[in-house]
């Protein structure tokens, strides 16, 4: 397998696919439907991870060039104009490097921090490659798989207006929303569907959707889909697409849970990486605050009363509701978002936070992946994250797109003693 480009940066506006060779993945070829071949067990650090690390660690001078424009990347004029109307003029590094490969029809493996521009990195070439195709009932030609309904809605909201500029119809299908309405959209014909695995499988089982005409498939936040146990459903859906389908995989983290997926379904992927948010965003300030357990709520209320947008993270759904209620009792407009809420309630809480009606949002870890809101200047780990991946994804809700932000971790005396053991 020949090497492809590997690139790295934490800055905006860098260009070119960068250098070629040392960071490329040399894994197995793509599996065809029904194949029984299995990849070998991954070592402590797989060649895939090493390739991504090499791409992320490459000196900036070796991979960066003067800032590119969206027009210089080969995107259609109508799409560039639509981006300009949304005040989007200069691409982020991950976009500059991955879009040319995706436009050329190559499989792409991308790793980048939350807020690095992954949605447009896959969305712009995906929309471009769908231009001019025939729109048929229940048979999309583009597919984006995401782990959560919030992320499905947000990817849809980012791509639908751009698709409209290209005469493309984009639809989102996910659980917790009206299946009847989603079926109606499919029957009228769509070009691109953004979906969670479970709801898409339900629609396929009802023969309302077929993936046989899919030309480009995107897997967004594949590591989170693995964490949630969605991989069997994801692979089943991928097996319904043609072996020649172009595949793009983007995520903030890519560890061994994704190795098998990449080895089985991506063919000679071009690898592009920007370093993770926690390790490279110099405008993100990390602090630890020692608190007594019975004083956590009072301190949280003091923090929540400050100007600015604050996001609290807790471990449980009940804890999210409880903290939001406690904050409201002391006069702080706070909402909660977690998996037990209806889709309408989740959407309303997120909209209130986005618009500033509620300056405070309390969220669980699962909900963290669906929160893509700019201008969050403070993230508070009210309860400690389960592991470094949760810390990364929680913290990545601030300091987005080059902005500054603060990450504050509460730690009680009991937690401190446990950590020292």
Image (tube, rainbow, N blue to C red):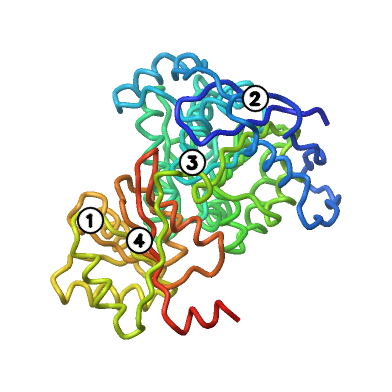
Q: Are marks 1 and 4 in contact (CB under 8 Å)?
A: no
The numbered dot on residue 105 is: 2
Which of label 1 and label 4 is nearer to you?
1
Q: Quadrant of the C terminus?
A: bottom right
Q: Between marks 4 and 2, how big is the CA–CA gap?
A: 36 Å
Q: Residue at x 40, y 23 (%)?
A: 90
Task: Say whether residue 387 is left or right of residue 407.
Answer: right
* Sequence-wise first label, 1 or 4: 4
Q: Between marks 4 and 3, how big is the CA–CA gap?
A: 19 Å
State the SS at label 3: strand
Residue sitting nearer the eye, 244 or 104 = 104
Q: Residues within 10 Å of mark 3 (few under 14, many from 20)?
A: many
Which of label 2 and label 3 is nearer to you?
2
Q: What residue is disc 1 on?
A: 352
Q: Are marks 1 and 2 in contact (CB under 8 Å)?
A: no
Q: Where residue 267 sits in the image (x, y, percent)?
A: 75, 35
Q: Between marks 1 and 2, how big is the CA–CA gap?
A: 40 Å
State the SS at label 2: loop
Q: Residues within 10 Å of mark 4 (few under 14, many from 20)?
A: some
Q: Between marks 1 and 3, how big is the CA–CA gap?
A: 26 Å
Instruction: Note whether 113 is above or below 417 in the view shown.
Output: above
Q: Where residue 318 sits in the image (x, y, percent)?
A: 37, 78
Q: What residue is disc 3 on?
A: 193
Q: Between marks 2 and 3, how big is the CA–CA gap?
A: 19 Å
Q: What residue is disc 4 on?
A: 343
Q: Are marks 2 and 3 in contact (CB under 8 Å)?
A: no
Residue 23, quarter of the rendered image: top right
Q: Residue at x 51, y 32 (%)?
A: 121
* Sequence-wise first label, 4 or 3: 3
Q: Residues within 10 Å of mark 1 (few under 14, many from 20)?
A: some
């Amino acid at each position: 397998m020949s090497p492809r480009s590997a690139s790295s940066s934490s800055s905006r506006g860098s260009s070119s696919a960068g250098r070629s060779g040392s960071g490329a993945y040399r894994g197995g070829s793509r599996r065809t439907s029904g194949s029984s071949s299995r990849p070998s067990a991954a070592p402590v650090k797989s060649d895939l991870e090493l390739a991504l690390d090499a791409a992320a660690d490459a000196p900036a001078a070796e991979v960066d060039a003067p800032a590119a424009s969206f027009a210089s990347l080969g995107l259609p004029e109508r799409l560039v104009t639509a981006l300009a109307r949304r005040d989007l003029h200069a691409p982020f590094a991950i976009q500059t490097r991955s879009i040319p490969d995706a436009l050329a029809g190559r499989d792409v493996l991308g790793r980048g921090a939350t807020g690095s521009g992954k949605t447009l990195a896959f969305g712009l070439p995906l929309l471009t490659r769908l231009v001019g195709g025939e729109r048929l009932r229940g048979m999309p030609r583009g597919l984006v798989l995401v782990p959560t309904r919030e992320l499905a809605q947000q990817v849809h909201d980012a791509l639908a207006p751009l698709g409209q500029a290209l005469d493309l119809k984009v639809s989102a299908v996910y659980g917790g929303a009206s299946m009847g309405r989603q079926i109606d959209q499919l029957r009228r014909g769509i070009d691109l569907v953004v979906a969670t695995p479970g709801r898409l499988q339900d629609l396929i089982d009802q023969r309302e959707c077929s993936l046989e005409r899919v030309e480009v498939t995107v897997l967004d936040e594949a590591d989170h889909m693995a964490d949630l146990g969605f991989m069997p459903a994801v692979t089943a859906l991928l097996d319904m697409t043609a072996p020649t389908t172009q595949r793009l995989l983007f995520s903030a983290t890519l560890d061994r849970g994704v190795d098998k997926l990449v080895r089985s379904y991506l063919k000679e992927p071009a690898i592009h990486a920007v370093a993770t948010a926690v390790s490279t965003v110099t405008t993100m300030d990390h602090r630890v605050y020692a608190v007594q357990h019975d004083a956590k709520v009072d301190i949280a209320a003091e923090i929540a009363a400050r100007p600015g947008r604050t996001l609290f993270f807790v471990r449980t759904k009940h804890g999210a509701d409880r903290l939001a209620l406690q904050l409201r009792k002391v006069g702080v407009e706070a909402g909660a978002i977690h998996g037990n809420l209806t889709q309408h309630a989740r959407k309303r809480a997120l909209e209130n936070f986005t618009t500033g009606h509620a300056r405070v949002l309390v969220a669980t870890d699962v909900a963290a992946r669906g929160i893509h809101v700019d201008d969050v200047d403070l993230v508070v780990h009210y309860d400690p994250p389960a592991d470094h991946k949760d810390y990364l994804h929680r913290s990545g809700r601030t300091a987005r797109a080059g902005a500054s932000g603060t990450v504050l971790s509460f730690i009680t005396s009991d937690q401190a003693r446990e950590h020292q053991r």
